[in-house]
Amino acid sequence: MKVHECAVHSLPSDLSPVVDAYEHALLARYPAPRYMPGRAAPFWKFLIAAPEWIGDALVNAIMPELKPSNV
């Protein structure tokens, strides 16, 4: 299965957290610097804060089809 097909099949049916985040970002007097709605938000927050080599290792372990072929 290709990466984009996996992404489409893993989309949640309820997009209201995303819509709520957009609404808050547009209408709030002091919007947050970053919004991460959804179940995977804690993972992505960790991934952004982690050193690059840890993030690369985790992403390659989870989605090996994204690993560059020239490495």
Image (cartoon, grey):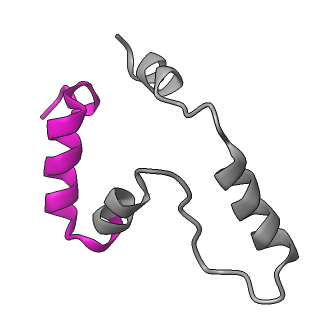
Q: Which residue is drawn at 44% across and 50% down?
A: 39
Q: Which residue is drawn at 48% across and 20% down?
A: 9
Picture layout, residue 66 above or below residue 15: above
- In the image as oriented, which residue stretches furthest toward the bottom? 30
- Would residue 1 appear left or right of 17 to someone viewing this image? left
Q: Where does residue 13 sit, x and y in percent of width and height?
A: 62, 31
Dividing the picture into quarters, in which one does residue 33 lie?
A: bottom right
- Would residue 7 appear left or right of 53 to someone viewing this image? right
Picture layout, residue 12 above or below residue 32: above
Q: Where does residue 40 sit, x and y in percent of width and height?
A: 40, 51
Q: Which residue is drawn at 29% across and 62% down?
A: 47
Q: Which residue is drawn at 65% across and 54% down?
A: 17
* The C terminus: image quadrant: top left
- Residue 68 falls inside the magenta stretch: yes
Q: Give the range drawn in magenta.
A: 48-71
Dividing the picture into quarters, in which one does residue 52 lie?
A: bottom left
* The N terminus: image quadrant: top left
- Closer-to-camera residue (22/39): 39
- Closer-to-camera residue (48/40): 40
- Numbered marks: total: 0
- In the image as oriented, which residue stretches furthest toward the top? 1
- Would residue 22 appear left or right of 44 to someone viewing this image? right
Picture layout, residue 28 above or below residue 53: below
Dividing the picture into quarters, in which one does residue 42 lie?
A: bottom left
Q: Where does residue 15 sit, x and y in percent of width and height?
A: 67, 42
Q: Main secondary structure of the magenta part?
A: helix
- Residue 35 falls inside the magenta stretch: no
Picture layout, residue 62 above or below residue 4: below
- Closer-to-camera residue (63/67): 63
